[in-house]
């Protein structure tokens, strides 16, 4: 009569190989998830910064006049604070202004979004240029309408 040995089960080497493969796969999965979450957060910040920059440009357009200079401000509260800096400079063409708007995050890490555009503000006639420019400056400082 023949006796059969029970060979059912896994050897120690097979179990160690399975654990190694599982560990490598789990490490790759974890790395992939953290990369996806980081990309999602960066995308969210860039989208918010783009909306802020576009909003500031629209505010500048809605004022009806463009003054050369720099302004800055903050939008948001808590950890979602964004700082923006806007610089307006004249170009060689009279009435055409270059606007550069930079939005930074609350972490102070640097620029998240930068928007550059050109805005046209028709030149003021020579006869009333001094009074209109002073009126524009006063309205801009006080927050009044043009």
Image (spheres, rainbow, N blue to C red):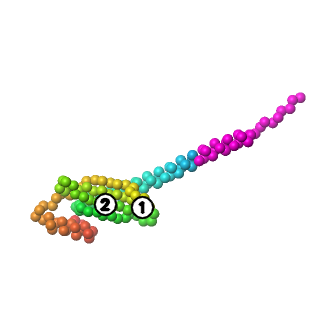
Task: Give above or below for 96 relative to 138.
Answer: above
Q: Position of residue 133 (x, y in %)?
A: 18, 66
Instruction: Say what secondary structure mark 1 lies in.
Output: loop
Callout 1 crowding tier (Cα within 10 Å): few <14, some 14–19, many ≥20 = few
Image side of residue 89 versus residue 21, left or right: left
Between the C-alphas of marks 2 and 1, the distance is 17 Å
> In the rendering, which numbered label is found on residue 126?
none
- In the picture, measured across the screen, residue 99 lies left or right of residue 30, that is left
Residue that carries the numbered disc 2 in the rendered image = 86
Residue 86 covered by magenta stretch? no
Q: Which residue is mark 1?
A: 108
Query: What residue sits 65% from the left and 44% below the top?
Result: 20
Residue plotted at (30% across, 64% down): 71
Report the side of 97 relative to 125 (left or right).
right
Which residues make up the magenta segment? 1-27
Nearer to us of marks 2 and 1 is 1
């Amino acid at each position: 009569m023949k006796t059969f040995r029970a060979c059912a089960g896994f050897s120690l080497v097979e179990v160690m190989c399975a654990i190694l493969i599982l560990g490598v796969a789990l490490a790759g999965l974890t790395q992939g998830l953290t990369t996806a979450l980081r990309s999602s957060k960066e995308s969210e910040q860039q989208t918010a910064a783009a909306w802020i920059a576009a909003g500031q440009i629209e505010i500048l357009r809605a004022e009806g006049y463009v003054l050369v200079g720099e302004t800055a401000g903050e939008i948001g509260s808590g950890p979602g604070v964004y700082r923006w800096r806007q610089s307006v400079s004249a170009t060689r063409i009279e009435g055409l202004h270059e606007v550069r708007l930079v939005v930074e995050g609350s972490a102070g890490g640097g620029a998240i979004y930068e928007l550059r555009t050109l805005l046209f503000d028709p030149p003021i006639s020579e006869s009333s240029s001094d009074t209109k420019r002073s009126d524009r400056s006063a309205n801009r400082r006080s927050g009044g309408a043009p």
